Image (cartoon, rainbow, N blue to C red):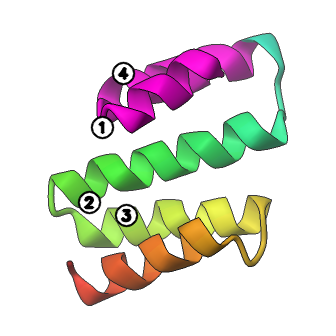
Amino acid sequence: MQLGASLDKQKKYDESVKAYNAALAQIPKDTKATYSLHMAEGNRHMTAKRFPDAVIQFEAALRVIPNDPEATAALKKAKAGK
């Protein structure tokens, strides 16, 4: 988990996705790891300007942690295509 968070801060989303998947392999259904995985996937799609895919991931993050301000803001940007 810490590795994924560190990679997120460095905007190394491909690597952070792998780290979160590894964390989930160790502790399946971990809420924070699941949320973080969706956020990293969403950010990876945003970087590639794949906004519809980013929307899907940010919506998934909000299903894990409803009303999360970071996911809500990211979803808004993805829907606006920014």
Instruction: Report how far apart the C-alphas of labels 4 and 1 lie in the structure.
Output: 9 Å
The quadrant of the picture occupied by the C terminus is bottom left
Identify which residue is drawn at 54% across, 30% down.
5
Residue hosting label 3: 54
| Identity of the residue drawn at 26% across and 70% down | 51
Label 2 close to label 3 by CB (< 8 Å): yes
Sequence-first disc among 2 and 4: 4
Q: CA distance from mark 2 to mark 4?
A: 15 Å
Q: Tag 3's secondary structure? A: helix
Residue 2 numbered tag: none
| 80 vs 58: above or below | below
Q: Report which residue position mark 2 lands on.
A: 46
Q: Nearer the viewer, mark 4 or mark 3?
A: 4
Q: Give the Cα distance between marks 4 and 3.
A: 17 Å
Q: Are marks 1 and 2 in contact (CB under 8 Å)?
A: no
Image coordinates of residue 63 in percent, x first then y, are 74, 67
**Local secondary structure at mark 4:** helix
In the image, taking residue 36 as reference, residue 40 lies left or right, namely left
Kind of residue indicated by mark 1: Lys
Q: Nearer the viewer, mark 1 or mark 2?
A: 1
Q: In the drawing, what numbered circle is on residue 15?
A: 4
Magenta extent: 1-25
Mark with earlier residue (1, 3):
1
The nearer-to-camera label among 4 and 1 is 1
- The answer for how far apart the CA atoms under marks 1 and 2 are is 11 Å
Q: Amino acid at mark 2?
A: Met
**Rendered location of residue 53, percent (x, y):** 35, 63
Label 1 CA crowd tier, 10 Å (few <14, some 14–19, many 20+)? some
Q: Is residue 6 magenta?
A: yes
Tell me how far mark 2 sits from mark 3, CA to CA.
6 Å
Which amino acid is tagged 3? Ala
Residue that numbered label 1 is attached to: 11
